[in-house]
Amino acid sequence: MSVVKRVKCPNIVERDGKTIRCATRHDLRNGDANKKSIVCRKCGHHIAIGPDTADWYIEYYAKGVRYWEKVGFSKTLAEKALGKRKAEVAENRFIRIKKETPSVPFKDFSAHYFERHSKQNNKSWYRTDRPNIKILNAFFGEKLLSDITSDVVETFKEKRFKEVKPATVQRNLSCLSSIFNKAKQWKRFEGENPVSQLPTIKVESIRLRFFNGNEIYRLLESCDGYLKTIVIVALNTGMRRGEILSLRWQDIHFESGTIHVSNTKSHRSRQVPMNDKVRAALSSAPRHATSDFVFFKKDGSSIGDIKKSYATALKRAGIQDACFHTLRHTAASHIVMATSDLYAAKEILGHSTIEMTMRYAHLSPNHKQQAVEALSRRLDAVATPSNTLVNSSLAPVPVNA
């Protein structure tokens, strides 16, 4: 009886005139289990070994018959399953039934989800998924995925409503839903996502805090050095903190007047135009002798955070209820108030959908009126004798014709 890691060759090969998957099984025993790849003994393909390709199996004998059972990605879980089978065989309680998708403890799968999905795909995993998963593990950790029903989730929701605001509960449930979706996708769970069966929590719109003109003046007066340059860039471009701190000089194009932003939340790069204030601030910024970072430490590495210096500047300016992201809201708000151009704001800010930008629409109450006025001017311009319809099939037909 043993616990074995097994991988199948994913290579596509030609056999008997047919294109099929090789699917040769390889048991990774002893030191093979720790290798990053192996060579398929049948087709020679290099097989990567990881959570996407390898699973743990248990091998045991019952009444002289050899059995294999797939357990999943967890060696610990496989060892527990093998111990259970050993006890059943020893006590003559073993009954072979059709093997279904093994149910995994929530805490085991949430750890797998965190490492494989959150850290790989969510730039803000440390302050979003990490605390959410911690909360979920406290309630669901010892339960199997298959035991978490919509009724159990409803109990969790009721408990959280007594502790935190509805918006926080919704973030907890969104994370839980994502975990179950990945469990289904990775074949670790069968059935319906229990969160999808519950109604979405209605969350009140959050007031968008942005700086007024006097606050902007006081803040800039309270900043100096590289912090002042960073604040000027943020106020005039709406770029996020991480986008600004990761800038390199190769991203700054003074000739075209644009900044190439690649380290974005959506993983989609964009071009942000520079105005005179941004151009002047960056032109006068010091450069490191060996580093290409625009904002750097003494050793040339990128500045990791400016939380302390920015908080000091806010305090010195007498500004409360604000954070660095308020600069982004300020840029967006003043773009909309000055131009009423929501689409331009969307492109500059890098919003993935126009719905994100529509949060600022109320700041320009005249944008609809301006739109119909522009339509009127357009119609006046085209409705001239030289632009009348000449095609008789398109021309208005007289009533008495």
Image (cartoon, rainbow, N blue to C red):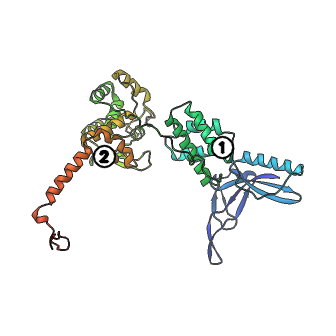
Mark 2, secondary structure of its residue: helix
Camera-side residue of 228 and 131: 131
Specify whether residue 76 is in view: yes
Q: Which residue is mark 1?
A: 106
Q: Residue at x 37, y 35 (%)?
A: 208
Q: Amino acid type of disc 1?
A: Phe
Q: Residue at x 11, y 65 (%)?
A: 386
Camera-side residue of 288 and 189: 189
Q: Is residue 156 above or below residue 188?
A: above
Q: Quadrant of residue 147?
A: top right
* Image quarter in which the C terminus is found: bottom left
Q: Which residue is mark 2?
A: 342
Residue lying at the far bottom in this picture: please name it.
17
Camera-side residue of 399 and 71: 399
Q: Quadrant of residue 42?
A: bottom right
Mark 1, secondary structure of its residue: helix
From the top left corner, tell me how far across and down residue 66 is, in percent. 83, 59
Circle 1 residues within 10 Å: few <14, some 14–19, many ≥20: many
- 62 sits left or right of 158 in the view: right
- 180 sits left or right of 71 in the view: left
From the top left corner, tell me how far across and down residue 82 is, in percent. 79, 49
Q: Of the two numbered discs 1 and 2 on the same chain, state the one appearing first in sequence.
A: 1
Q: Is residue 153 above or below residue 228?
A: below
Q: For the residues labelled 1 and 2, say whether their Cβ atoms are less than 8 Å apart.
A: no
Mark number for residue 260? none
Circle 2 residues within 10 Å: few <14, some 14–19, many ≥20: many
Q: Amino acid type of disc 2?
A: Leu
Q: Residue at x 22, y 50 (%)?
A: 372
